[in-house]
Amino acid sequence: MTNEDLPAYDDHPAMFRNRPLGYIGVWVLILAPVLALLMYREEVAEMGGFPPAMLLAATGLGIVILLYWFVKTRHTRLRITGDQVHLERGLLSKSHVELDVGQVRAVRVYQNLFDRIFRVGSIAIFTTGDDPEFVVAGMPDPDRVRDHVRTHLENPPSE
């Protein structure tokens, strides 16, 4: 594999860094009911069968949310190899966008304060027109994508 075959960027959206409060909240939803059942098992047992079932349902809901989020992030992938930009989305039905870096007119990176702290952001790729070709949120190190495209446009590879 030559150096040109290696991707300049290949990543999925981040889970924790993209939404840290939501990530912590889901883990609290998973762990808090289990800890409550373990620490107060006698008190909960005296309440009957309904409270433990509700606590376990909250844990189950947290697990479902976490698994959905994980699958959603793993089935979105942005890859830049040489002079190609690839975006793949989907689990059962796939969507694939492939662009030549030479077609790219602009790359916009959107980051709020927390995004900047956690080094993630939304990337919008524009080719022609006012609407972006695609926007993908929560990508780690989005400036690397913009810098690669800018460098490639300023110094196209010689053939």
Image (cartoon, rainbow, N blue to C red):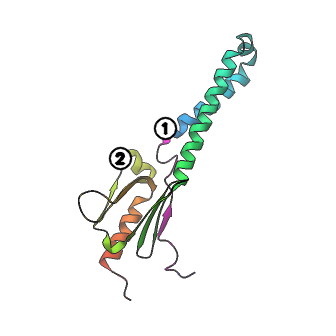
Checking the image for residue 10, the label placed there is none
Q: Residue at x 33, y 60 (%)?
A: 133
How far across and how far down the image is residue 78, in percent? 46, 62
Task: Assess disc 1: are there few (<14), some (14-19) or many (≥20) residues with their C-alpha within 10 Å of its C-alpha.
Answer: few
Q: Residue at x 64, y 32 (%)?
A: 60
Q: Quadrant of the C terminus?
A: bottom left
Choose the circle earlier in sequence order: 2 or 1: 1
Q: Is residue 23 above or below residue 57?
A: below
Q: Is 8 covered by the magenta stretch?
A: yes
Q: Is residue 5 above or below residue 54?
A: below
How far across and how far down the image is residue 14, in percent? 50, 51
How far across and how far down the image is residue 76, in percent? 49, 55
Q: Which residue is mark 1?
A: 21
Q: Amino acid at mark 2?
A: Asn
Near-viewer residue (47 or 25) = 47
The magenta segment is 4-22
Checking the image for residue 112, the label placed there is 2
SS under mark 2: loop
Q: Amino acid at mark 1?
A: Leu
Q: Is residue 99 left or right of residue 57?
A: left
Q: How far apart are the two marked residues, 2 and 1, measured between alpha carbons? A: 14 Å
Q: Is residue 116 above or below residue 30?
A: below
Q: Quadrant of the N terminus?
A: bottom right
